[in-house]
Amino acid sequence: MEKEHTLQSLKGKGWFQVAPGVWGIRDVFVNMYLIQNVRTRSWVLVDAGLRTSARKIKRLAKELFAPHFAPAAIVLTHGHFDHVGALPKLLREWEVPVYAHYLEAPYLTGRSAYPPPDPYAGGGLISIMSWTFPQDPIDLNGHLLLLPEDKSVPGLEGWRYIETPGHTPGHISLYRESDGLLLAGDAFATTKAEALTCTLAQARHISGPPRYFTTDWVAAETSVKKLAALQPSTVATGHGRPLHGKTMQHRLQWLADHFKLIAKPHFGRYSKESAVAGINGVEYVPSPPASRWVILAGVIALVATSALIYNRRKS
Ligand SMILES: [Zn+2]
Ligand SMILES: [Zn+2]
């Protein structure tokens, strides 16, 4: 009873229950998940949010799993700054392995930076601001282990991981077959992740992977089709609220069927050509979109400003 009361008191402070044995924490605009292994009672952390997320993760872990509230493992859907931010702090306290896909390892061991974000990708203010986001790779040497090839998830019975590249080269999603629960990381989002207002308000909207960080739109489309084909009962993503039921399934299928039209940027750095990556990291990055548009926008802004100054002086 006491524990229930404490959990209730944490409600509204960024945590939510997704399904039996699965809890989520939202920090500013990104989610991370705590999953309990039913048989062993141990738990696994999926993604590690922002630098500020460590305190929130530990607080909920303590409420749920005390007295032994360190996880058995941490699993990463991918290594973007908003999914690994709390790791340095957490790993100082928790001597636990961190698992990721082998194609994500270069960005988690300091070997390679991701391809640059795409401020031309459109969709909202967050895309435009994306060039300011941290881009240096985190170094998890000594902690990082590769996910097993048999698609099992260490520390989590009944779950498997699904390769869902496109947003990043080694992006994975997690799936619990018994109840159709899908944790999709940034393979797609349940809010418009590029729009600041939607993200802060957590507006419900099944949309493609966050545009500014997605560097292979061909692979991203295949990944969304693969996930929609599962017909999950519940989806919980890196950005946005968990969604359930038939309406969600129809919207996810709609996204898969019309991906090029509604998810892929029409005019972005990676729209025509994808970045290429291998086991050692990034191998090729296409040039930014034709600079003539940028120059044209600059010329229009210059002409408009000059006209304004001229008119003011004249009057
Ligand atoms: Zn991401
Ligand atoms: Zn993200």
Image (tube, rainbow, N blue to C red):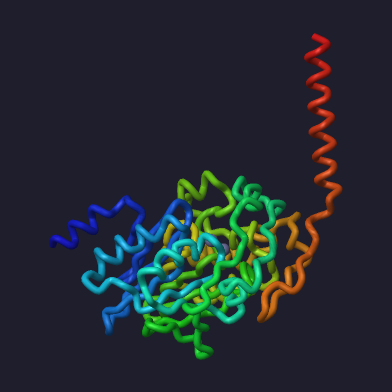
Q: Nearer the viewer, residue 134 or 206?
A: 134
Residue under the point 26% across and 65% down: 62
Q: Nearer the viewer, residue 233 or 292?
A: 292
Q: Quadrant of residue 5?
A: bottom left
Q: Nearer the viewer, residue 32 or 262?
A: 32
Horizontal arrangement in the rendering, residue 88 relative to residue 37 (left or right): right
Residue under the point 34% across and 74% down: 71
Q: Quadrant of residue 207?
A: bottom right
Residue 27, percent from left and from top: 42, 55
**Which residue sits furthest left?**
1
Residue 245, percent from left and from top: 42, 65
Q: Is residue 25 above or below residue 47?
A: above
Q: Is residue 264 above or below residue 122?
A: below
Residue under the point 62% across and 60% down: 135
Quarter of the image for the N terminus: give it. Answer: bottom left
Tell me if residue 199 can be seen. yes
Q: Quadrant of residue 81?
A: bottom right
Residue 189, percent from left and from top: 53, 61
Horizontal arrangement in the rendering, residue 118 relative to residue 15 (left or right): right
